[in-house]
Amino acid sequence: DFLPLKCDACEQIFCTDHIAYAQHDCTSAYKKDVQVPVCPLCNTPVPVRRGEMPDVVVGEHIDRDCKSDPAQRKRKIFTNKCLKPGCKQKEMMKVICDQCHKNYCLKHRHPLDHDCSAAGRPLSKAG
């Protein structure tokens, strides 16, 4: 039958042979065609909200939440940046100053090494 049918995703008119999303290469099919993509690395389903592109969501999953070995090796572990001006060193763990409560690298962790801005407090207990 060749009655005109309206695609519920792109709202264009097609015959019954071409009404399927794949048959007319529907550009809005991702809005209506609800499928749960599976991560190619860890084989877990990745939930996608309506209107989101599955490729983008799976990519974000691989970058952040994926439990597979290649994805975990790729993640950065040195994320705690030293707050001393001019220092670009990053540490695996936070090294917080007891006086100003800011994060520094191992080289600048002592109050004298980062010009500690803790007002009114002595720089060392011995002083």
Image (spheres, helix red, strand yellow):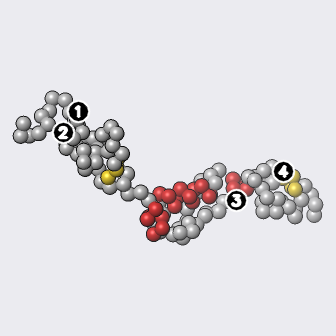
Q: Mark 1 = which residue?
A: 117
**Label 1's element?**
loop
Q: Nearer the viewer, residue 119 or 66?
A: 119
Disc nearer the start of the sequence (1/3) = 3
Note whether residue 125 is visible: yes
The 10 Å Cα crowd at callout 4, few under 14, some 14 to 19, many 20 or more, is few
Q: CA distance from mark 4 to mark 3?
A: 16 Å
Type of the residue with mark 2: Leu
Secondary structure under tag 4 reads: loop
Please say if 26 is above or below 119.
below
| Label disc, if present, on residue 12 of the rendered structure | 4
Instruction: Check whether the beta carbons of the residues at disc 1 and disc 3 lie within 8 A of each other.
Output: no
Tag 3 residue: 33
Identify the secondary structure beneath mark 2: loop
Query: What residue type is disc 4 on?
Result: Gln
Residue type, numbered disc 1: Ser
Where residue 93 sits, quadrant-wise, is bottom left
